[in-house]
């Protein structure tokens, strides 16, 4: 009986493909669902633009209603999902949201908060994946990146907060945020106010860092996938159960 069911399912799929190619069925038979369908994502999606595969804008501010891409879609009716693939020796690749439309400075009196509950699938071949960022406009450096690293200081498969205390010096601090979860979602909360960066993971305090040397520089948050490893190549996928940007 199982064999017959498989044959029927396969025949049905071939029929749908054939009818679509002949123009007898609409192309959206295989369309992706839009993350905007879920109320939990609407607020943040009204404040962002989608960039892929470099910094090219694929969906602009205010344009997310009914929009989805093969690299940005709603999975299982629950998760806002990003996919990206980088070829070895190729250019940087991204599929990520750029928060806005207004930028902010680290000495802000009002808290700038990014809160994300996400799950990174087991990476394919890649050595590093950036998931969340605070990024400066000029100079174009990130004061903070939340990065998965395959192996750093002999610690494997962990996520790290990579903090750059100054835009004018090359020093970088690595703070271990814990091992990548194979099944469960992890919540990251980032807050910037009055020149101070604070971060917690699943409600547990992880770091406090002065960003006073970044005063006077405009910044913004980013969320999704950013693949930039030199000599790196492979596929990545991250799912968000929730994402919010408050200011």
Image (cartoon, rainbow, N blue to C red):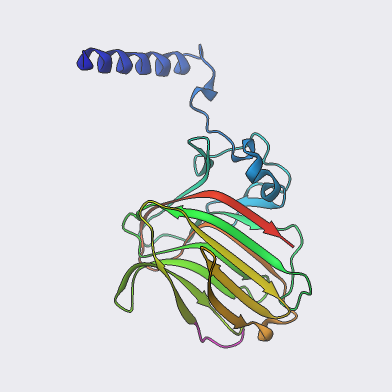
The image quadrant where one finds the N terminus is top left
- Residue 54, visible in the rendered structure: no
Query: Which residue is pictured at 67% across the width and 58% down the height?
Result: 245
Q: Position of residue 35 (x, y in %)?
A: 59, 40
Q: Main secondary structure of the magenta part?
A: loop
Range of residues picked out in magenta: 167-172
Residue lying farthest to the right in this orientation: 109
The verdict on residue 113 being magenta is: no
> Which residue is nearer to you in this view: 46 or 109?
109
Residue lying farthest to the front in this orientation: 203
Above or below 198: residue 45: above
Query: Which residue is pictured at 57% across the width and 57% down the height?
Result: 116
Asked whether, in this view, residue 233 is left or right of residue 162, the answer is left
Q: Position of residue 241 (x, y in %)?
A: 53, 48
Above or below 72: residue 235: below
The image quadrant where one finds the C terminus is bottom right
Asked whether, in this view, residue 136 is left or right of residue 21, the answer is right
Above or below 135: residue 210: below
When asked about the image quadrant of residue 197, the answer is: bottom right
Above or below 195: residue 44: above
Asked whether, in this view, residue 89 is left or right of residue 117, the answer is left
> Which residue is nearer to you in this view: 200 or 169?
200
Q: How many marks?
A: 0
> Which residue is nearer to you in this view: 144 or 190?
190
Query: Which residue is pictured at 68% across the width and 37% down the height?
Result: 65
Q: Position of residue 218 (x, y in %)?
A: 72, 72
């Amino acid at each position: 009986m199982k064999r017959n069911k498989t044959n029927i399912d396969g025949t049905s799929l071939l029929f749908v493909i054939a009818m679509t190619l002949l123009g007898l069925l609409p192309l959206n038979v295989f369309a992706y669902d839009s993350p905007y369908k879920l109320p939990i994502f609407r607020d943040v999606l009204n404040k962002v633009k989608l960039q892929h595969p470099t910094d090219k804008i694929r969906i602009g501010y205010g344009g997310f209603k009914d929009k989805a891409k093969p690299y940005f879609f709603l999975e299982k009716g629950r998760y806002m999902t990003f996919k990206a693939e980088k070829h070895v020796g190729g250019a940087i690749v991204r599929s990520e949201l750029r928060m806005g439309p207004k930028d902010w400075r680290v000495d802000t009196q009002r808290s700038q908060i990014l809160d994300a509950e996400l799950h990174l699938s087991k990476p394919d071949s890649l050595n590093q994946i950036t998931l969340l960022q605070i990024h400066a406009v000029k100079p174009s450096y990130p004061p903070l990146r939340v990065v998965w690293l395959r192996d750093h200081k002999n610690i494997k498969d962990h996520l790290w907060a990579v903090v750059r205390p100054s835009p004018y010096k090359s020093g970088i601090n690595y703070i271990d945020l814990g091992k990548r979860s194979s099944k469960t979602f992890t919540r990251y909360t980032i807050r910037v106010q009055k020149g101070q960066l604070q971060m917690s993971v699943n409600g547990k305090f992880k770091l406090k860092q002065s960003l006073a040397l970044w005063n006077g520089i405009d910044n913004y948050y980013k969320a999704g996938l950013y693949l930039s490893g030199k000599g790196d190549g492979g596929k990545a996928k991250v799912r968000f159960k929730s994402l919010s940007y408050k200011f």
